[in-house]
Image (cartoon, rainbow, N blue to C red):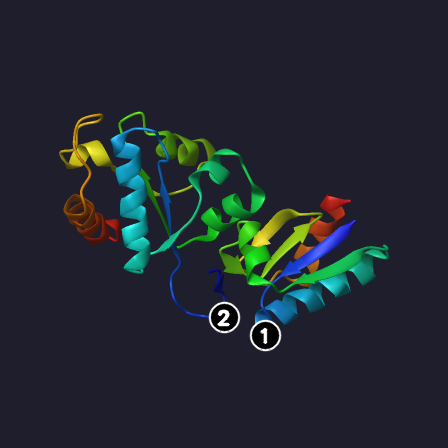
Amino acid sequence: MKVQILGTGCPKCKLLEQHAREAIQELGIQVEVEKVTDIDRIMEMGVMMTPALAIDGDVKSVGKVLTKDQAVQIIKGGK
Amino acid sequence: MADCCCGNGETNLIYSCSGAANTGFLADQVMRSLSRQKVGKSTCLAAMGADLSGFVGSARVATRNIVIDGCPVACGRKIFESKGIAHVHFIMTEFGVEKGKTEITGELIEDIAGQVAARAKE
């Protein structure tokens, strides 16, 4: 499974990445984390507001910083 | 371009019919005019119909979704209704345009775009 963090590098994008990494650590699973910062790739995925979180290319959250607990639920559901 | 939620502005997304008739062409051109006027960002109605996750997710959190259909078949409205996503809706034939008949000119496009821009945020 690959967790993708979509954002161009603003503070909220970094916070989402941090929460996603904490969630993965809490779940104790081995997943790849990819930071997608290229705006063309972000747009190709249909994301019009960042930050966003996707799992294996399927966008799960758009335009908000998920809490660690929200990220846990989404990543659990994406397994 | 995608907006960053670090900003405080609103995000309006615009979708248009891509039908084969003159009304579909008009809807597309009106969307492009609105995008140039920065009323909102043009995005893809077909992707909404195809249920692509990023597009649907963006529509769900947009400040406003502006859906421009060409004719009363209203494919765009039906896509948004089927997903339960709020939107403001316009049909080009309600602006005095006849499907298959009216010539689409630059003047007509800008006239209707102006009317849509004024009404979209009501």
Q: Name the residue beneath numbered marker 1.
A: A11
Q: Residue at x 75, y 48 (%)?
A: A76
Q: Chain of mark 1?
A: A
Marks 2/1 same chain: no
Query: Can the viewer see residue B89 in this picture?
Result: no
**Quick one: SS at disc 2?**
loop
- Decide if residue A69 is on the left or right side of residue B95: right
CA–CA distance in space, label 2 to label 1: 8 Å
Residue type at the position of mark 2 = Cys
Is A7 in front, or is A23? A7
Q: Which mark is residue B47?
A: none
Q: Residue at x 59, y 74 (%)?
A: A11
Query: Can the viewer see residue B76 in this picture?
Result: yes
Is B78 in front, or is B21? B21
The answer to which quarter of the image holds residue B29 is top left
Residue type at the position of mark 1 = Pro
**Total marks placed:** 2
Vertical placement of residue B22 versus B30, above or below? above
Residue A14: image x %, image y %? 64, 71
Residue A54: image x %, image y %? 65, 52
Q: Chain of mark 2?
A: B
**Quick one: SS at disc 1?**
helix
Dots 2, 1 in contact, CB < 8 A = yes
Q: Name the residue beneath numbered marker 2.
A: B6
Residue B14: image x %, image y %? 36, 48
> Residue lying furthest bottom in this view?
A11
Residue B122: image x %, image y %? 22, 51
Q: Residue at x 25, y 50 (%)?
A: B120
Crowding at mark 2 (Cα within 10 Å: few <14, some 14-19, many 20+): some
Vertical placement of residue B86 versus B103, above or below? below
Q: Residue at x 35, y 31 (%)?
A: B19
